[in-house]
């Protein structure tokens, strides 16, 4: 297996968020290679970490990289919306924190056989969990023009979604990343190809999100985490896509207002009960030095909430 190495994004800011949490378990819901988890364990001695990840390679890597922390680390290969089930399995009543580092990791991008990147000629796979049956090839070759258009618009913010969808359907069957990238490139007007990076970037992002149901499972997973927090516990999310960030912002605002529907600026009379407070600044971005050292951090947005006593 290729060595699984991933540089955690905004690690200092993440650690600072979890320093004040009460003693207990911090859930790293996307543990990856264990970078954030190791930093939290090293800096916050009164917590242990429960690491979740749907990628078997990530769990294998984290098992090795976090072994030095002994009994303070527990790992499970599950999707993060299984959090409540794993807590039941481990008899955890509450947690002290939860971290979600969304999107795809560097090792997933950099391994050609995973099919996440147009940089390599590989099968159209894009599954984070190899036990899953549906692949990107299934979507590319089975979805109709309207379905593909919706996927590209919703998950990729792709301006030329319908043109690309029509070109993909006309070029079927498509089996490799290179075949798909070439079709997308040719479908986009020449002037647009020269702006904004690789012309297939948004298409590949959209397909990856759709294959893995990344946005579909996120709201419930965040709600599970917030409900499970002990008073003073914190939930933090690193997102890299506008759709992810909109969901995080909405779920955190719901927790912080209790779903209040009263007019802004007036006392609440609807009976809403906030369960958390949003930590400020509401939206944190990587420092310029980190972006220069790790360009993949550039699109990151960090948000966090703290559970309040009921």
Image: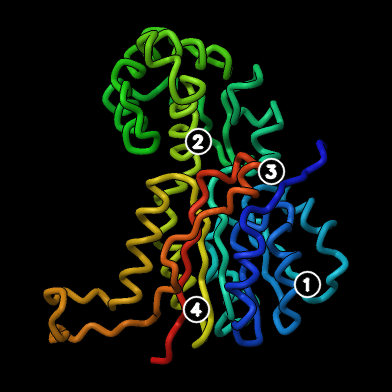
The residue shown at (34%, 19%) is 165
Numbered mark located on residue 228 in the image: 4
> Which residue, given by chain and number where applicable, does mark 2 sit on?
208
In the rendering, at what x and y percent does residue 208 appear? 50, 36
In the rendering, at what x and y percent does residue 228 appear? 49, 78
First-in-chain label (1 vs 2): 1
Packing grade of label 4 (10 A; few <14, some 14-19, many >=20) is many
> Which residue, given by chain and number where applicable, does mark 1 sit on?
42
In the rendered view, tell whether residue 296 sits above or below residue 228.
above
In the rendering, at what x and y percent does residue 210 appear? 44, 38
Numbered disc in front, either 4 or 3: 3
Q: Nearer the viewer, residue 109 or 289?
A: 289
Q: Nearer the viewer, residue 310 or 12?
A: 12
Numbered disc in front, either 1 or 2: 1
In the rendered view, tell whether residue 171 sits above or below residue 297.
above
Q: How many marks?
A: 4
Numbered mark located on residue 293 in the image: 3
Packing grade of label 3 (10 A; few <14, some 14-19, many >=20) is few
């Amino acid at each position: 297996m290729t060595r699984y190495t991933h540089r955690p994004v905004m690690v200092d800011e993440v650690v600072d968020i979890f320093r004040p949490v009460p003693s207990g378990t911090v859930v790293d819901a996307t543990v990856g290679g264990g970078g954030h988890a190791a930093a939290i364990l090293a800096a916050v001695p009164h917590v242990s970490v429960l690491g979740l990840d749907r990628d078997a390679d990530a769990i294998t890597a984290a098992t090795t990289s976090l072994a030095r922390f002994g009994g303070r680390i527990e790992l499970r290969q599950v999707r993060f919306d299984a959090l409540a089930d794993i807590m039941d399995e481990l008899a955890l009543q509450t947690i002290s924190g939860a971290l979600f580092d969304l999107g795809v990791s560097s090792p997933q991008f950099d391994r050609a056989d995973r099919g996440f990147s147009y940089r390599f000629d590989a099968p159209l796979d894009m599954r984070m969990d190899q036990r899953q049956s549906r692949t990107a090839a299934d979507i590319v070759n089975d979805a109709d023009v309207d379905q593909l258009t919706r996927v590209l618009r919703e998950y990729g913010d792709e301006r030329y979604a319908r043109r690309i969808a029509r070109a993909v359907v006309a070029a079927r069957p498509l089996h490799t990343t290179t075949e798909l990238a070439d079709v997308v490139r040719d479908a986009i007007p020449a002037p647009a190809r020269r702006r904004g990076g690789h012309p297939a970037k948004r298409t590949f992002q959209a397909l990856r999100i759709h294959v893995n149901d990344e946005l579909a499972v996120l709201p419930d997973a965040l709600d599970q985490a917030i409900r499970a927090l002990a008073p003073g516990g914190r939930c933090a999310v690193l997102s890299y896509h506008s759709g992810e960030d909109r969901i995080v912002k909405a779920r955190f605002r719901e927790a912080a207002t209790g779903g209040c529907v009263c007019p802004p600026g007036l006392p609440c009379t609807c009976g809403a009960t906030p369960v958390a407070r949003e930590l400020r600044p509401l939206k944190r971005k990587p420092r310029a030095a980190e972006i220069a050292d790790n360009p993949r951090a550039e699109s990151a947005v960090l948000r966090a909430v703290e559970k309040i006593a009921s």
